[in-house]
Structure formats: C-alpha cells, structure tokens
Image (cartoon, rainbow, N blue to C red):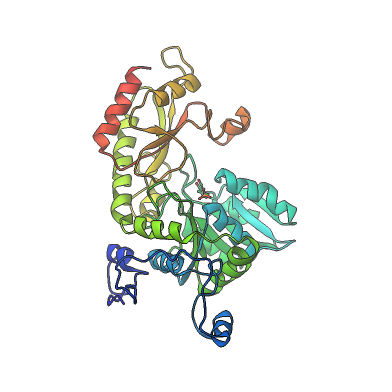
Amino acid sequence: MSKIDLNKVRFSTKVVHAGQSFDPETGALSTPIYQTSTFCFETVEEGAAKFSKTIPGFTYTRGGNPTTRALEVKMAAIEGGEDCVATASGMGAVGAVMIAFLKAGDHVVCGDTLYGGTSVVMRTNLAQFGIDVTFVDTSDLEAVKKAFTPKTKLVYFETPTNPLMTVTDIKSISKIAHEKEARVVVDSTFAPPPIQFALKLGADLVLHSVTKYLNGHGDVLGGVVVGTKEDIALIRGNGVTKICGNPPSPFNSYLVLRGLKTLVMRVEKHCQNAMDLAKYLKTVSAVKEVYYPGLESNPFHKLAKEQMNGMYTGIFSFELKENINGMNSFEAGKKLVNGLKIATIAVSLGDPDTLIQHPASMTHSNVPKEIREKSGITDGLIRISVGVEDVEDLIEDFEQSFANL
Ligand SMILES: Cc1ncc(COP(=O)(O)O)c(C=O)c1O
C-alpha cells in the first residue's frame, strides 16, 4: 500500500499517486491489467456477500474491475470529488448522466454550443423520452435565469465551447441553478485539471471525454463522471452498469492510468504552446480573428483567467480574412491546412501531436451554411489542438503554409 496521505500533498504528487496500490501478490508498482470479465468465489456465501455488497469485492467487470477502479479513484482525487465512474467513451458518460437523473416530463437548461454527439442527444434523443430541453447561451447569465421552468432538473453545458472557446461562469450558474434545486453538469473536456476544477467552482457533476487530454495519447476512447458518492452510485447503477452497459475495457483503463501520470506537465506544455501560437497568429495579416481566451483582447479573458487558473487550455480557433490573393476564405482555409507539414489534419484534441481541422469542410460540412455561420462557424474558421512539439517548429510550419497562399 502507498504510504502517502493524499490530503497533505500538492496537486502533481496527487495526480501521480492517487489510486495507486502496489499489487499485494507481486509488489508490482504499476496497476496490473485485470483483463477478466468475471471474478470467482471460494464459496456461495462469499459470492452472496460480494453481490449484496456486505463485503467489498468484484463480481463482474460491467459492475466494476480493479484496473478501472484504480482509474476512478485517481480521477475522483484529481477533480476533488467523492467518487467517479468510468465509461467506455465520453458519449457513454453523457448518456449515463441523462439516464440517471432525467425522466419523462423533466426539463433541461442546456448550453447552445455542444459537441456534435451531445447535441444529437439533447436535440433528438431526449425528446424521444418526453424530456424538454431549452437551449441557451450559458455565457449570458440573464438568459440562463429566464430559461428555467418549474420542471428544470438539470443545467448542462460545456466550457470552454467548441470551436469558438466561449467561457461560461461555472460559479454563477451553479448559484442560480441551486436556488432552483437543479443539478449542474459541466463537460470539462476542453479544460481538464489543473486548468479547471468544475466541482470546486460549484458544479454537482463534472464529466470528460477521457479520449482527449486526460488520456492524452490519442489511443483510447473513454469517459468519466465525478461527483458525490450518491450521484455516482446512481449513474453507475442506472446508467453505466445496467441501461447503457458501457464500462471501459480494463486495458483502456490501464492506458488512461498511464497517461494520467504525466497530465500536469503535458497540459502545461499544451497551454504554453497554444498561447505562443495564438499570439503569433494574431500578427498574421491573413488572419481576421483568433478565438483564444488566453489573449487579453478576448472578451472572456478576465473570467477565464480566474476560472481556468490562468492556463486557458491548448485548443483554439482562428478565422481567415475574406479575400486572400483572390481566394475566398473557404478556399484559403483548405489551402492553408493542406500546406501544413507538422500539424496533422484530424479531428479530436489533447493528443501529443498538433491536430488541425477546417470545420466548414469537415466536422460541420453537412450543416447548412446559414446555420453554421449563425453560430460563428464561418468558411474561414480553422480549429487547432496544439500539441507538445516545439512551438518554434509549429510557427515555422504556419509561416511556410501562409507564404504559399
Ligand atoms: C466536449 C466533448 N464532449 C464529449 C465528447 C464525446 O467524447 P467521445 O468521443 O470520447 O465519446 C467529445 C468528443 O469529441 C467532446 O469534444
């Protein structure tokens, strides 16, 4: 067993050590991969006691697995929550939360800028179950207040949002929601600890697509939800274990545990590189706007400085001007992205590699242009997840591609 008192150590130490217990059989330092679907018992009585939870222990991996449990304990410590449940993907976490806390007739106040998959759940799937959703710009606190009804049970939003990096004030929204006895759920995928600690700011539940910064190596799909013991037990029982049946594989849990050990230094590097690249892009004549809350000119800078611990995350968007050497911004955007040699054309974020995408021709290509542009996703908008390469190389890569426009 580890001798560390996690309440007495600083954050990076906690991230490395939380959830770790040396393997009692072998003394292995790294958490073993318990790649098993089921667990056996010496006697029927032992099985009965473990199923009824009168003694602790594992029975079947859908309900719990030692490798996955180590990940859950680590994530609860990282987010400062009482407990955590891990899922097979970020969408698994979103779905499990909805199933745990909503029933027909309930109402949700929901951020109007969401990851595409979550948007489908909120706009289509919840209606199938008789749940009403009001979409609102959650950075506008007055609009949020007006969106509540007597049936509101949940307030759900992402901060910062994808791709324009709008920041929502978690503390203020939590205060408003708690006066109305609604739970606040924050998707903090774009700003993991140590950037943002949603629970400490007042949210009831924080969820992540672990696929992104938390695993950080682009080789796993996963999700987590962190909150109180009671709420996590409900999500685990009603959502993950039963209706959704979507726990992670023990192997993926192991990979995430491994990735988390370097979370703090990776995130610091992503944030520093993003800041340097955003500042460079701000000086480029073909660039109309850079949407990064780390820039003092950004309308969310003041709030982000406080809420995101002055780190502002590693992802942002920028927009090209309308006429660049006779090209419209759609053509120029494609040419700029195609001309990059280090930044890889791909969706997702939080990988060591810099990933870049052109929403108008990729993720949002099937959204009609007027609807896209209404939410700020113009033809010249480019989203970049800044990796952990040397930022000088990234800047030189952009310089050569801009020079060829
Ligand atoms: C903000 C956000 N939430 C949730 C998800 C869904 O996560 P996953 O792809 O792991 O299911 C994503 C995926 O990109 C995301 O960006």
Whether residue 216 is visible here, answered yes or no, is yes
Q: Quadrant of residue 353?
A: top left
Residue 20: % across, % down: 34, 69
Asked if residue 256 is positioned above or below residue 53 in the image, the reply reads above
Residue 94: % across, % down: 57, 56
User: Foreground: 187 or 89?
Assistant: 89
Q: Quadrant of residue 195?
A: bottom left
Quarter that holds the C terminus: top left
Give the residue at the far front of this rendering.
42
Quarter that holds the N terminus: bottom left
Asked if residue 64 is positioned above or below residue 385 in the image, the reply reads below
User: Foreground: 250 or 89?
Assistant: 250
Q: Which residue is drawn at the image coordinates 30% and 76% (left, top)?
A: 5
Give the residue at the far top of this rendering.
326
Whether residue 112 is visible here, answered yes or no, is no
Q: Which residue is drawn at the image coordinates 49% and 78% (left, top)?
A: 57
User: Foreground: 86 or 203?
Assistant: 86
Q: Quadrant of residue 44?
A: bottom right
Give the residue at the far bottom of this rendering.
45
Q: Which residue is drawn at the image coordinates 53% and 28% (left, top)?
A: 361
Position of 249 compared to 314: left or right?
right
Position of 163 compared to 274: left or right?
right
Position of 241 compared to 297: left or right?
right
- The mark total stands at 0
Residue 159: % across, % down: 48, 50
